[in-house]
Structures are given as C-alpha cells and as structure tokens.
Image (spheres, rainbow, N blue to C red):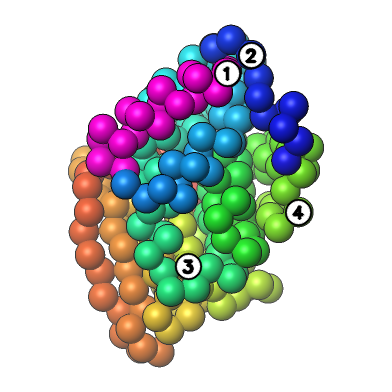
Amino acid sequence: MNELDIQGVGMTSQRTRDRLMKRLQTKGIQNQDVLRIMSLVPRHLFVDEAMSSRSYEDSSFPIGHGQTISQPYIVARMTELLLESDSLENVLEVGTGSAYQAAVLGGLVKNLHTVEVIPELYRQGRDVLYDLGYRNIRTHLGDGSWGWEEAAPYDAIMVTAAPDEIPSALINQLKVGGRMIIPVGAQKSEQILQVLTRTSESNYSVENHESVLFVPLVSGN
Ligand code: SAH
C-alpha cells in the first residue's frame, strides 16, 4: 500500500483512525494485529464519498444495492475470531460488499478469495483492492453460498451475510481443523455469530458468540 494513499487528511486522518481503534479496544477488541491492520486500512476509500467524513465512526453504512459496509467493531470481532485458526494460508470470504473486510483480511492472511453476488459491487471491490495494491486477494463474481470450489479447501472461511442455516457446501470446503465465522439466523429475528470448527471429515462443532445483524445471504438453491 502506498503511504500517501492511506494517510488522508482531516476527518480521514491517522488521528481520527486512532480514535476508532481506542473505541474498539474499549469494546473489548484485544488482538493487536487486528488493531494494527485496522488502523492502516483507509475505510474512507470503501464508503460512498458523501459518507467519507463519517467513515471512522463505529457504524455500518449503506453501500448501494440494499447492502451495507459492516460496522468496524463487527469487522474487528470476526477477524479476531478468524485469527484463532491454526493456519491462514488460504482463506475464503463470502460477501465482498465494499471490500473493506477483505482489505483487513488481506493484511493478515497469505491468500484471500472473496466472492460477491452483485456484479457492480464485485467490480467496485475488485478495483479498489487493485488500486490499493493488494495482490494476495482474488475477487470472484458468483453465489458464495456454494463457496468457491476452485480454490478449496480453506483454512478458514468468513461469511459476511446471514443464511438461515450454514450451507453444507461451505462446510465441505473447510479443511479438517479449519474454522468458519458466520452469522446465522432469519432476518429481523435474532442472528447469532457462530464459529464452526470442522473436527473431522464427517463432523463439526459450533460455538455461539454475540448476536449480530447482517443482510441475508441470498441463495440460488
Ligand atoms: N464484507 C462486506 C459486508 C458486505 S454486506 C464489507 O466489508 O463491506 C454483505 C454482502 O454479501 C453484500 O454485498 C451482498 O451482496 C453479499 N452477498 C449476499 N449473498 C451472497 C451470496 N450468496 N454470495 C456472495 N455474496 C453475497
């Protein structure tokens, strides 16, 4: 990443970002790698220009097409949970959206594949990641409820849209020992952030974390 590109001015300055990092710490984010990377990723470049002065608030924002960029606290929390994986060589994200979460992951994992189903968001995400210099992130257009078979299996999977139930294709594309971070639950009722660990070829365990609110994972099934 080019230092000049990421510095920004005024409301997008390093000081504004550091204030957000303090807020994330107050809310319980402890992983120093997550805080360090999030203080470097220029979130204002992933939101609509009209919103850029507010981009270091701990809020989600609309990104068009009825979709949202996730709240920084949720990005930090999900990233922290993902980093508990044993290996981070090959990671999948489902739901590129603004590509902000992908950029955060791109600074922490070796190779990231990210899948988006809305063509325009896919193109925007691909372009912003390219312009910022990420070369370890591959963006794909498609229905990520089927995962991304070509690059499977994955050490870890992060899903940033909520299905009613965890898609079995995603479980099958996890390595044994791999972890999936995923919000699960029907819209407008409670969704729970879950961590699924594939314990063997035929088994997995699930831990429940906090309640969350994500847009639905659309599915072509
Ligand atoms: N990670 C994103 C969050 C975006 S919101 C960010 O940092 O901004 C969720 C995204 O998931 C939306 O862009 C939506 O279009 C996408 N999505 C929903 N269902 C999907 C599916 N089946 N496959 C791929 N992307 C999907």
Q: Which mark is residue 156?
A: 3
Labels 2 and 3: the sequence-earlier one: 2
Q: Which mark is residue 9?
A: 2
Side of 124 relative to 30 (left or right): right
**Measured Cα–Cα span from mark 3 to mark 1:** 32 Å
What amino acid is at disc 2? Val
**Horizontal arrangement in the rendering, residue 97 relative to residue 58 (left or right):** right
Give the distance between the C-alpha atoms of the residues marked 4 and 2, in whole angstroms.
26 Å
Percent of width and height locating residue 105: 55, 52
Gap in angstroms between the C-alphas marked 3 and 4: 19 Å
Q: Which residues are magenta?
A: 12-29
For disc 3, the neighbor class at 10 Å (few under 14, some 14 to 19, many from 20) is many
Which element is circle 4 on? Answer: loop
Q: Report the amino acid beneath label 4.
A: Arg
Q: Which residue is mark 4?
A: 135
Q: CA distance from mark 4 to mark 1?
A: 25 Å
Name above or below for residue 103 compared with residue 115.
Answer: above
Q: Earlier in the sequence, mark 3 or mark 4?
A: 4
Q: Which is more N-terminal, label 1 or label 3?
A: 1
Name the kind of residue labelled 1 in the image: Ser
Local crowd size for mark 2, using a 10 Å CA cut-off: few (<14), some (14–19), many (≥20): few
The residue that disc 1 covers is: 13
The front one of 26 and 211 is 26
Indicate the secondary structure of the residue bearing disc 2. loop
Report the Cα–Cα distance between label 2 and label 3. Answer: 35 Å
- Labels 2 and 1 touching (C-beta < 8 A): yes
